[in-house]
Amino acid sequence: MDAEEEEKEDRGSKRGAEEEEKVERGVEKGGKDKEKGARKIQGPDICKCGESPVLIVDDNDFNLEMLRVLIEQDLLITPDQARDGEEALKVFREKWGRVQECPRADCPKRQHRVVFMDLNMPVKDGYDSAAEILAFTRSQDPSRVPKIMALTAFVGKDTSQRCSEIGMVEVLHKPADSGMLVAMVKKHCPELGDYIES
């Protein structure tokens, strides 16, 4: 290998290392710096309690990971996660009790404001889990009922009707995309608008 080829290889290795570092820092190829965006929301009006206002539920690890990545990139939020309806109910209730200690009564992260719920899961399906989460919050504080959105690969009339009767606000078709998630959060939870990168 001559000197010119060695120099090209060194430059290529350096670029590869830089790209890897960007990915680790959450920087996309288009120049969107996640860290910069995250700093943007750390003003005095945003509570720093460290809680997440979004819960995602899916029994498929790949689907769960893809949903997490989309939400982190486009909403600048690291969501809480659960892998079945029973775990979702547990995570939701634990957070409800834990964040009551937050000093800000209007903190947008005092609870899970948005829940993206898979429907077909083992242990407890999304229908039953959503119904129990909604019943729990209505009994505790009707003003803080979360917006639960179903995620399913099978969107039919019966599915939509059942979700509506339970109290879910949307039925979204899998696979989810970032534009859809952002639009749904803006529509149903405008108070989380400070988190969404423009």
Image: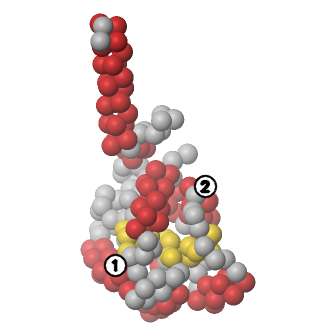
The answer to whether 164 is drawn above or below residue 62 in the figure is below
Residue 179 has which mark? 2
Tell me, yes or no, whether the two marked residues, 2 and 1, touch with CB atoms within 8 Å.
Answer: no
Residue that sits furthest to the front in the current view: 1
Return the residue nearer the eye: 8 or 93: 8
Tag 2: Cα neighbours inside 10 Å, few (<14), some, or many (≥20)?
Answer: few
Q: Position of residue 67 (x, y in %)?
A: 47, 62
Q: Decide if residue 156 is on the left or right side of residue 105.
A: right
Q: Secondary structure at mark 2?
A: helix
The answer to whether 151 is drawn above or below residue 176 in the figure is below
Q: Position of residue 196 (x, y in %)?
A: 51, 52
Give how far apart the Cα atoms at labels 2 and 1 are.
Answer: 27 Å
Q: Position of residue 61 (x, y in %)?
A: 40, 68
Q: Position of residue 133 (x, y in %)?
A: 45, 86
Tag 1: Cα neighbours inside 10 Å, few (<14), some, or many (≥20)?
Answer: some
Residue 111 has which mark? none
Instruction: Kindly identify the amino acid type of the residue bearing the numbered disc 2.
Output: Gly
Residue that sits furthest to the top in the current view: 3
User: Which of the 4 quarters of the picture holds residue 84?
Assistant: bottom left
Q: Quadrant of the N terminus?
A: top left
Instruction: Kindly identify the amino acid type of the residue bearing the numbered disc 1.
Output: Val
Q: Identify the residue at horizontal 30%, vertical 73% (top origin).
A: 99
Q: Decide if residue 17 is on the left or right side of residue 124.
A: left
Return the residue nearer the eye: 112 or 15: 15
Q: Which residue is mark 1?
A: 91
Q: Quadrant of the C terminus?
A: top right
**Which is nearer the N-term, disc 2 or disc 1?**
1
Q: Identify the residue at horizontal 34%, vertical 12% (top origin).
A: 5
The answer to whether 180 is drawn above or below residue 162 in the figure is above
Q: Secondary structure at mark 1?
A: helix
The answer to whether residue 90 of the structure is visible from this angle is yes
